[in-house]
Every structure is written in structure tokens, then in C-alpha cells.
Image (cartoon, rainbow, N blue to C red):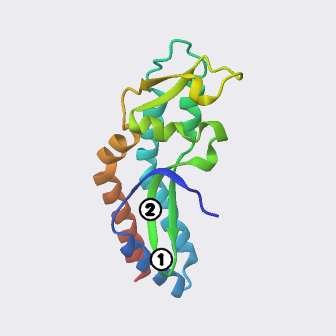
Amino acid sequence: MPPVPLFNIEVSGGDQFRRLAVRMKQAGRTDLLRELRKELRNAGRPTVNDVQRAYRTLPDISVAHRSGAQARATVAKAVRVELRSSATAARVRVLVDAKRLPEDMRPLPKVWEAGRWRHPVFASGDQTRSQWRWVEQQSQPAAVFRRTCTSHAPAFRAAVLRAMDQIRFRLS
């Protein structure tokens, strides 16, 4: 089962990637396909690095400072480049892979992206959830993933197209 991304940024032009991958498979050039996949991952590396850095440097606004740094580092490790290619579809995208996060941390990137969330204060096992006192907390800055990826999108797209052109030239 493929990973379910919490967020992703896709580079348009997937159809070009799909056609090139199909051509390489038909020509029996799996070596070039492997090289293309490596180059596409390298093209996404600067974006992944910056998204990871952005997550790791999110300010900890918690008064308790419990596990904020650990949570930010764990989410940062779940950011990756995904490549998919088949006869019908292809894509290159940067995503936060929820399957790489512990069960209790899976909502974090979505919450951080939204910019606010609700949580109970001094929840008691004697009470029902509706009886707990709930507060809303703001995340600063919000939309870290989207903002970081969007700023990288033109360079990422250019690097992907450049890698495909190099492989296309070697294939012909």
C-alpha cells in the first residue's frame, strides 16, 4: 500500500515523466530509468532539506516545553521525495509521509499547517471528553510546509525537467 501523504507539493509535467519512463522501459534501458529516478530525488533534495529545517526550527510556544523538539525532529524525518511512474501516470512530489510518524504524532503536520488546534487542559479520566476544559492554541508560523515548498517549486520543476532532458538526450 502506498504512503498516504499529509501534505504534498507536486511538480506539474508528470505526463512528460510518464512518457519518458515508458520509453526507457520499452527500450530496455532500466539503467537510465534508475539514473533518472536518482536525479529526480536529487532535484527534490534542496526542498526536502529546507522543509526539514523549517520543521526543526519551529518555535516552541509550549509553556511546559515537554517534547516539542522531539516532535519537530520526528516530523522533519518524515519529509521525503516520492517518485511514481506507470504506463498511465507519473509524479514527483515532496510529502510528509504519515506512515513514518508514530501514531500519536500523525496529526501534527496537518495541525501545524492549519495554524491552530484545540486540546484539553488537565483532562481527567473521571470525566467525559465533553466535560473537559478545552482551549485553542495557535501555531506560529502556520503553513510552514506549503510556504517552503512553494518557494522551491520553480527551481524544483526546472531541476526535474533538466534531469529528464539529460536522460532523454542519452536515450535518443
Q: Is residue 32 above or below residue 75?
A: below
Q: Which mark is residue 92?
A: 2
Residue 37 spot, x, y in % from top left: 51, 64
Tag 2: amino acid: Val
In primary-sequence order, the first of circles 2 and 1 is: 1
Q: Residues within 10 Å of mark 1 (few under 14, many from 20)?
A: many
Direction from residue 34 to residue 103 in the image, left or right? right
Quarter of the rendering occupied by the N terminus: bottom right
Q: Secondary structure at mark 2?
A: strand
Assess whether mark 1 and mark 2 are in contact (beta carbons under 8 angstroms). no
Q: Is residue 153 above or below residue 58?
A: below
Q: Residue 73, located in which quarter of the rendered image? A: top right
Which residue does the numbered mark 1 point to in the structure image?
Answer: 21
Residue 96 spot, x, y in % from top left: 51, 47
Q: Nearer the viewer, residue 114 or 76?
A: 114
- Toward the bottom, the furthest residue is 26
Residue 67 spot, x, y in % from top left: 60, 22
Mark 2 or mark 1, whichever is nearer to me: 2
Q: Which mark is residue 121?
A: none
Quarter of the rendering occupied by the C terminus: bottom left
Q: Is residue 149 above or below residue 160?
A: above
Direction from residue 62 to residue 113 in the image, left or right? left
Residue 102 appearing in the image: no
Q: Residues within 10 Å of mark 2 (few under 14, many from 20)?
A: many
Q: Residue at x 56, y 24 (%)?
A: 120
Q: Secondary structure at mark 1?
A: helix
Q: Residue at x 44, y 57 (%)?
A: 93
Q: Nearer the viewer, residue 32 or 124?
A: 124
